[in-house]
DNA sequence: TCATCAGGTTACTTTTTGAAACTAGCAAGC
DNA sequence: GCTTGCTAGTTTCAAAAAGTAACCTGATGA
């Protein structure tokens, strides 16, 4: 079947709702480095709250992008990992994050320039 | 300079705040098909409100990813286009959207399965 | 006995969103 | 000369989402 992300009715938009999300992108990218536990994700991704992490993980699991494995240790540990589908997606997310890291300097100078222009106009 | 998106202090996170956004991704992708006017974007990207579009465009312009050209026609027309930097970014966004379109079927069946499992558990 | 760990959930507050109405400047129609 | 329509926005206000911080469970070690 053919999908078109520009259409609001397109189910691919639901994916975009999940994937076009800062935290989801970071979580997926982190998981691409290997299976990770809940609190490890929380520690590694600075600024991500427990509530949001738990929501994001549920969404990603529902989408079949990650798996949730519970180990009956004490205290219980839960490990999240990418599925095949998730890995395939993450292959497309990595370049985006690397691009962000690589081009920050240019963006920052563009922002400074823009702000200067705006201040001048005002 | 080296950046790390996992750190909350990392300036690349500000980019991610802009790029890890459903509407921004759609706008960038649409602009990769050529310069486009305000209302054309609004019409093409179904569900995008004027307010949000105007905010997204301002952010993207500030980041140096798009340019805004005003033509003194009557009524005035405004055309948005990708900069070199924006094109370079969009090259990384395209695959993500194509992935979303291509893998929707798998995601939808994963969702159905997940919901069935949850309903059963409850 | 009290604090600690993991992996969450809940209650409450603050931001963001989104829908719809409103603005400005000008031209065409009546 | 009054109304309507066009573009490209801004404003307003209710509703949804996100963030903050406290709480929960159940075993464990000090």
Image (tube, coloured by chain):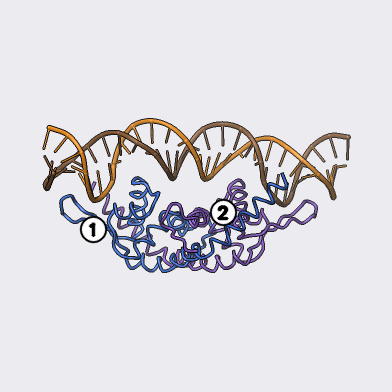
Chain colours: A blue, B purple, C orange, D brown
Quarter holding residue B60: bottom right
Residue B118 location (% of width, % of height): 27, 51
Measured in 3D between alpha carbons, the distance from the residue under mark 2 to the one under mark 1, in whole angstroms, is 38 Å
Q: Is residue D11 left or right of residue B104?
A: right
Residue that appears at 64% across and 64% down: B83
Chain letter of disc 1 in the image: A
B106 or B97: nearer the eye?
B97
Task: State the count of labels.
Answer: 2
Q: In front: A94, or A43?
A: A43
- Quadrant in the rendering for residue C24: top right
Q: Residues within 10 Å of mark 1 (few under 14, many from 20)?
A: few
Nearer the camera: disc 2 or disc 1 = 1
- Image point 65% across, 56% down: which residue? B40
Look at the image and tell me whether residue A106 can be seen: yes
Instruction: State if disc 1 and disc 2 touch (CB < 8 Å).
Output: no
Residue B22, label in figure: none
Residue occupying the point 55% across, 61% down: A105
Query: Mark 1 highlights which residue?
Result: A69
Q: Residue B90's image quarter?
A: bottom right
A11 is higher (above) or lower (below) than A88: above
Q: Quadrant of the N terminus of chain A?
A: bottom left
Residue behind mark 2:
B46
Secondary structure under the numbered disc 1 in the rendered image: strand
- Give the residue at x 38% y 49%: A48
């Amino acid at each position: 079947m053919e999908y078109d992300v520009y259409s609001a009715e397109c189910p691919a938009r639901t994916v975009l709702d999940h994937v076009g999300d800062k935290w989801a992108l970071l979580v997926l990218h982190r998981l691409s480095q290997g299976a990770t536990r809940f609190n490890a994700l929380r520690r590694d991704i600075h600024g991500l709250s427990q509530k949001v992490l738990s929501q994001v993980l549920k969404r990603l699991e529902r989408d079949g992008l990650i798996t949730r494995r519970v180990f009956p240790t004490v205290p219980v540990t839960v490990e999240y990992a990418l599925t095949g589908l998730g890995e395939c997606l993450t292959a497309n997310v990595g370049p985006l994050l690397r691009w962000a890291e690589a081009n920050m300097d240019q963006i920052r100078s563009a922002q400074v320039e823009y702000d200067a222009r705006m201040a001048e106009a005002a």
